[in-house]
Amino acid sequence: MITMHRHSRVCVNVLWGQMSPCLYSDNLRIPTQTCSLRAFGSDSKGSGNNGSCPDTPDPPATEDGRKIAPLFGRRRPLSPLERVSRLLPEESLSPEIWQLRELKQEEIAERAEEQSPDDRGTQGSSREYGAPLPGERPMCFGEHVLAEYQRRRHEFRKMFQLSEGSSLQSSCGVIPHESIAGCPSGSVLHTSIGLPMLLRRPSLDEFTLYMRRGPAIAYPKDCSAMLMMMDTCEGDCVLESGTGTGAMTLFLSRAVGSKGRVLSVEVREDHHRRAVRNYQRWRASWSLRRGEEWPDNVHFHHADLQTAAPLLSGWGFNSMALDMLNPHLVLPTVIPHLHPGAVCAVYLANVTQIIDLLEGLRCLSLPVACDRIVEVQYRDWLLAPSFRKDGSFNSRRAPVVEDEEQDSMDDDKDIQTSPPFGSVPYIARPHPEQGSHTAFLVKLRKVFSSSPSRESPGSGRRLQARREGATVTGVKGAEPSLTPPCAAPAHRRA
């Protein structure tokens, strides 16, 4: 609005300057002015037409044939000198300014020829990479694609499904889905405003992060740690309680393979439906990507595991994964179906839930021991070459002596555009945006006493109490004792 007001004020001043000689003359004649309308739109050619005014006149030209830039056309930012020169009459401009304008227009024309709007949608296509590699498949309609754009602090990521007649719309511009289909994964296409956008297939951890969700998901870093705890391999039979959005379900399905089975139980119906849809979307996208079916090895059930003893009859599990508010309430139902020596991994959000779980184990007569309690944290780092203020690379140098200071200043003038290997210093520091706490992981193991006839029913609890002090967050602790650490026996105090 400010720009339109400024341009309208300039037009009024020019019009007044042309009319002022006529106002003071005897024969008052107002010169005729030709007015034209310019339509504004967002078509792919950047001409400003939206289809309503196809006969918009071209920009006017001067007597010597030079074309004047359109008033509201999309152009680069002007310098203060160029802004002032645009407001001055053309007769007062020097030949040097006209020469600079011609050079700028030639540069813009060369860039437009190098990258025309018709080629923006095909940049990075398979034609530039030659023949496809064995097993390589281009992106097609129906599969999920991840779009990425990152420049300085502006970061954009979006996962979407390719469909005919649709387009990727964002603050970075628009890309039709027809331009994406047929390109290999990892192609860089340009949006309608000329910004490069990386388009590729998402991995499984990225799919779980950007898929549609209802409850909070189990993050990939925690899922991988739980799979290591459970030692899940191909052919295993795994029980999952608390399906949620289905993130952990997908990781378990890949770990057990086509020979294994996953029994996933969810108490809420809306979460159950969401997990089933996400699982089906991933399987459909995988079949289009690889040309083979994802193993259909997950059995979803909508039930309460506390009262689902008939559901588990006839099942034996190599491992278990529990993601619940009160996991100690279902342990009496699920532990009898866990193989001896197998692991039950529990996903808990806070320490209060861990305390309730350990209290439940202490009060229950179950052959379960707590092996470990961990919190998984990743630390991202930034590594980048060192640049000068003018955009060139810094270079490594030996300590400079005072006599050689003048020689080093002369060497600065001869800056190489491509420094040799090992001559550019790098800056390394932790990323300013670090991931916060997600969950605690509790590792429970099913154990049996070697001589149950000699042991009391509470022997499992004593073994579990000894294991509770064994390892907490990876640090080996001391044996638990009923005597407080600050107190001493009475005979020692005497």
Image (tube, rainbow, N blue to C red):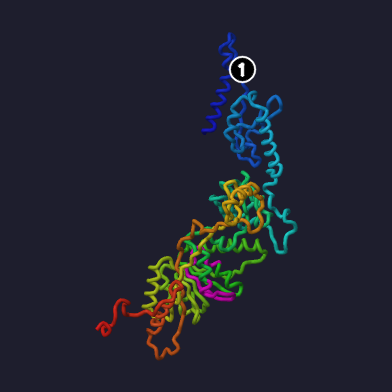
**Would you say 13 lies left or right of 486 here?**
right
Query: What x and y, as percent, mark residue 334?
Result: 46, 76
**Residue under pointer 1:** 31
Q: Quadrant of the C terminus?
A: bottom left
Which of 73 and 84 lies nearest the eye of the viewer? Answer: 84
Q: Judge whether 20 appears above or below 134 on screen.
A: above
Query: Which class describes the residues within 10 Å of circle 1: few (<14), some (14-19), or many (20+)?
Result: few
Residue 114 picture location, percent across and down: 71, 44
Q: Is residue 43 left or right of residue 350?
A: right
Give the answer, above or below, for where 9 lies relative to 418. above
- Tell which residue pokes out farthest to the top in this image: 26
Percent across and percent down for residue 208 are 54, 62
Residue 249 falls within the magenta-colored stretch: yes
Q: Nearer the viewer, residue 46 or 373?
A: 373
Residue at 51% x, 59% y: name it: 430
Residue drawn 51% across the image and 57% down it:
431
Q: Amino acid at mark 1?
A: Pro
Q: Nearer the viewer, residue 146 or 281?
A: 146
Q: Residue at x 63, y 54 (%)?
A: 199
Q: Which residues are magenta?
A: 227-250
Can residue 166 be seen here? The reply is no
